[in-house]
């Protein structure tokens, strides 16, 4: 009798689906260079690229497919509704499925343009069907790699521009900011590359490497300073690092995951701080403090609660001096018992472990990353927005009557609203 039969363990079948690597970043030249290095290591690797420069103007997209021998396809497609979701659903995913079926033994690298976020592609892959079958039957996302150029990284993360200011908006109503989009690309990645081939390591590269680690502490971080295709390919290809069930960065705290690292002492000038509070924010004081809170750091993310809206979990993102907030649903303390099963097991366990007799699972968790800011001063600014003892004693019924600048902002549609 074999060992497998004795143990009752069935042999694992090999996953024969082509592995898809998403290459993302706000520096197209660096992202393209990383893809080129991968094809030098494996000339059979298919690299799919998109040019969305004309999408907002006339609804057309340009798709290219190449491998180590050169360009294999170069096509322009007119979409009925020119938008990012249509591009992904109507052109990108069918192309990936077609290429995966044509080369079942080969892998694919998808080079995303700066205004196409990897989360959009990954989410669409999870629920879209092509030719009556799930996309995931044909191809699997293996990893999401953020490629960062040290020459432009800080300016991008600190930019106060919108995508439209740089001609990168994907539709007339695309109100995303440059800093938010770039930060989300980094935070969603499972691997982050600081792209600096042909250079010697110096203080600036070290500082930026620390900054990237603070922005995304759950990713693997690599500094590419040598032109070595085999080295890079071995670390990016078929790593299996992508987790489709990972929570959104600003909602990680609800699931019991760390939302960031708390490193209040500067490391090469980089400071990271996590702020937590059980007591809610006073809506008017918090609203007045928004510019100061957002202006102190490069990036903030997490969730919070307002006294005037005690049922709503409020998502928080800040970057480039701006703030985006949105609705993450209801606190379990404000949810009927028979609806708790709609939440993930991780969230229910986390709520049980940290349940407060007065506030239930309500809690603010915010993570901030920046250069040379004083973490204690930021905490004091946030503390001043919390309810005072006298206000807390007034109770929830009175809180709901507070003047609320955020009234109507959280309409039950989950997610960040710009």
Image (cartoon, grey):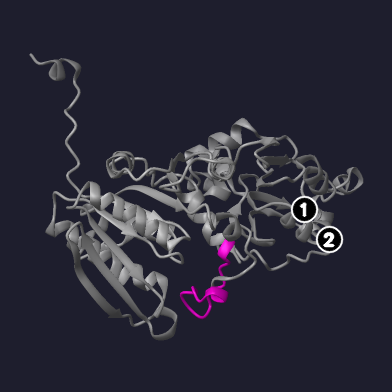
Inter-mark Cα distance, 2 to 1: 8 Å
Evaluate whether residue 63 shows in this view. Answer: yes
Evaluate whether residue 386 shows in this view. Answer: no
Q: Quadrant of the C terminus?
A: bottom right
Q: Which residue matches tag 2?
A: 402
The majority secondary structure of the magenta stretch comes to: loop
Image coords of residue 55 (percent x, y): 40, 79
> What residue appears at the point 80 percent right and 57 percent down from the top-left corner?
289
Name of the residue lying farthest toward the left? 1
- Give the magenta part as a residue range: 164-179
Image coords of residue 288 (percent x, y): 82, 61
- Above or below residue 53? Residue 312 is above
Q: Which residue matches tag 1?
A: 307
Q: Quadrant of the N terminus?
A: top left
Q: Are marks 2 and 1 in contact (CB under 8 Å)?
A: yes
Query: Closest to the observer: 242 or 136?
Result: 242
Image coords of residue 355 (percent x, y): 66, 34
Side of 20 relative to 374 (left or right): left
> What residue appears at the point 53 percent right and 78 percent down from the top-left corner?
173
> What residue appears at the point 29 percent right and 45 percent down from the top-left corner?
229
Q: Quadrant of residue 399?
A: bottom right
- Above or below residue 43? Residue 201 is above
Chain-order first, disc 2 or disc 1: 1
Name of the residue lying farthest toward the right? 390
Label 2 SS = loop
């Amino acid at each position: 009798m074999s060992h497998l039969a004795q143990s009752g363990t069935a042999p694992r079948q090999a996953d024969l689906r082509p592995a898809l690597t998403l290459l993302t970043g706000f520096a197209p030249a660096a992202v393209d260079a990383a893809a080129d290095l991968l094809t030098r290591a494996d000339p059979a690797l298919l690299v799919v690229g998109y040019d969305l420069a004309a999408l907002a103007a006339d609804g057309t997209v340009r798709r290219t497919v190449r491998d180590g021998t050169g360009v294999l396809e170069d096509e322009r497609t007119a979409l009925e509704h020119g938008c990012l979701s249509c591009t992904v659903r109507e052109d990108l995913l069918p192309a990936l499925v077609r290429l995966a079926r044509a080369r079942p033994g080969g892998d694919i690298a998808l080079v995303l343009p700066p205004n196409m976020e990897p989360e959009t592609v990954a989410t669409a892959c999870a629920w879209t069907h092509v030719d009556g079958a799930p996309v995931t039957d044909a191809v699997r996302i293996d990893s999401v790699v953020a490629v960062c150029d040290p020459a432009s990284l800080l300016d991008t993360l600190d930019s106060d521009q919108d995508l439209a200011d740089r001609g990168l908006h994907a539709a007339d109503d695309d109100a995303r900011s440059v800093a938010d989009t770039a930060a989300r690309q980094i935070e969603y990645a499972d691997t982050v590359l600081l792209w600096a081939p042909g250079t010697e390591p110096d203080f600036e590269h070290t500082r930026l490497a620390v900054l990237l680690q603070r922005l995304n502490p759950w990713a693997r971080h690599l500094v590419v300073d040598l032109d070595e295709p085999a080295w890079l390919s071995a670390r990016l290809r078929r790593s299996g690092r992508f987790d489709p069930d990972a929570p959104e960065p600003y909602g990680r705290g609800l699931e019991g995951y760390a939302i960031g690292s708390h490193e209040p002492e500067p490391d090469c000038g980089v400071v990271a701080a996590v702020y937590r509070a059980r007591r809610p924010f006073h809506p008017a004081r918090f609203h007045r403090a928004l510019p100061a809170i957002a202006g102190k750091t490069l990036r903030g993310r997490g969730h919070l609660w307002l006294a005037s809206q005690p049922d709503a979990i409020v998502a928080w993102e800040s970057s480039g001096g701006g703030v985006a907030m949105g609705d993450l649903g209801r606190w379990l303390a404000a949810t009927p018992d028979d609806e708790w099963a709609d939440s993930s097991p991780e969230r229910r366990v986390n709520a049980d472990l940290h349940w407060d007799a007065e506030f239930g699972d309500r809690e603010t968790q915010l993570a901030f990353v920046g250069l040379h800011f004083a973490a204690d001063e930021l905490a004091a600014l946030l503390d001043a927005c919390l309810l005072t003892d006298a206000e807390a004693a007034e109770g929830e019924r009175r809180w709901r009557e507070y003047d609320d600048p955020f009234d109507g902002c959280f309409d039950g549609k989950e997610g960040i609203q710009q």
